[in-house]
Amino acid sequence: MSEKNKIRALWPTLFGEFHNENHQNIKKELINFFEDYKKKNPSGRKKSSLGTENYNLYESKYDLHMQKNPVYDKLFSDFIMRGFFTMSNEANKSLLNNFSDKEIGVSITGSWFIHYEQGGFVLPHNHGECSWCCVYYVQVGKDATTGNGGTYFQKPTPNRTTLDFGSYYNRFNVHDFNPEEGKMLIWPSYVVHGSYPYKGDQDRIIISANANVSILENGKPINTK
């Protein structure tokens, strides 16, 4: 290929997969925190006027990062927020020089946990008012698979219209991720996703969070154009 020729990847959809090596050391404390939260908030998050996309599960309010739990806060500062920062830098790597003299900060707009009971699942949906979303698997059980408690994502681009080799890369409408304890997935907020029903010896427990990654000016986020 000539040096003048280029192939550009425009509007890519990035999915991050990160593994927390310290997970087993904090798993029990996280679950204890969630059990205590459930006792204090037995009804969890109230349904909206539009109903709910959840089935057979407990979902907390979107305020866990405000509860000042030391184990939860350390997980966020040492692992989850770094994942958001890494994904944002990768998505904007060709533009980072424009902000080389600026401070960049991650802000959590909401974080919550979901405790799935037998057969519990979440229907397809996406998240608003954030740039990135994540799921962190706290407990999944040894019998968890992509089809048993896994997370799936629907393709955000138009469907394939021809059956030639040129569009072969566009044949998948859904991608499944295998659930693993201590694994975190991060994706752009516009991607529609859900979870498969889970049945196993241990209930499935996950953490979800929404985040914005902002350029800071005098310590405050500013809009970019």
Image (cartoon, rainbow, N blue to C red):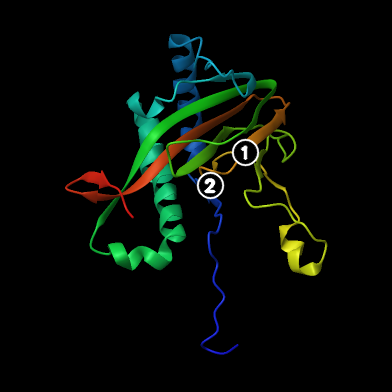
Q: Quadrant of residue 50?
A: top right
Q: Are marks 1 and 2 in contact (CB under 8 Å)?
A: yes
Q: Where the N terminus falls, by quadrant?
A: bottom right
Residue plotted at (56% across, 36% down)? 126
Q: Where the C terminus falls, by quadrant?
A: bottom left
Q: Where is residue 51 in the image (x, y as percent from the top left)?
A: 59, 18
For disc 1, the marked residue is 193
Say what amino acid the circle numbered 2 marks. Answer: Trp
- The one of 6 and 90 positioned closer to us in this rendering: 6
Circle 2 residues within 10 Å: few <14, some 14–19, many ≥20 = many
Q: Quadrant of residue 201?
A: top right
For disc 2, the marked residue is 187
Badge 2 element: strand
Q: Position of residue 23 (x, y in %)?
A: 50, 39
Would residue 139 be found to the left or right of residue 173 on screen?
Answer: left
Circle 1 residues within 10 Å: few <14, some 14–19, many ≥20 = many
Say what amino acid the circle numbered 1 marks. Answer: His
- The one of 24 and 220 positioned closer to us in this rendering: 220
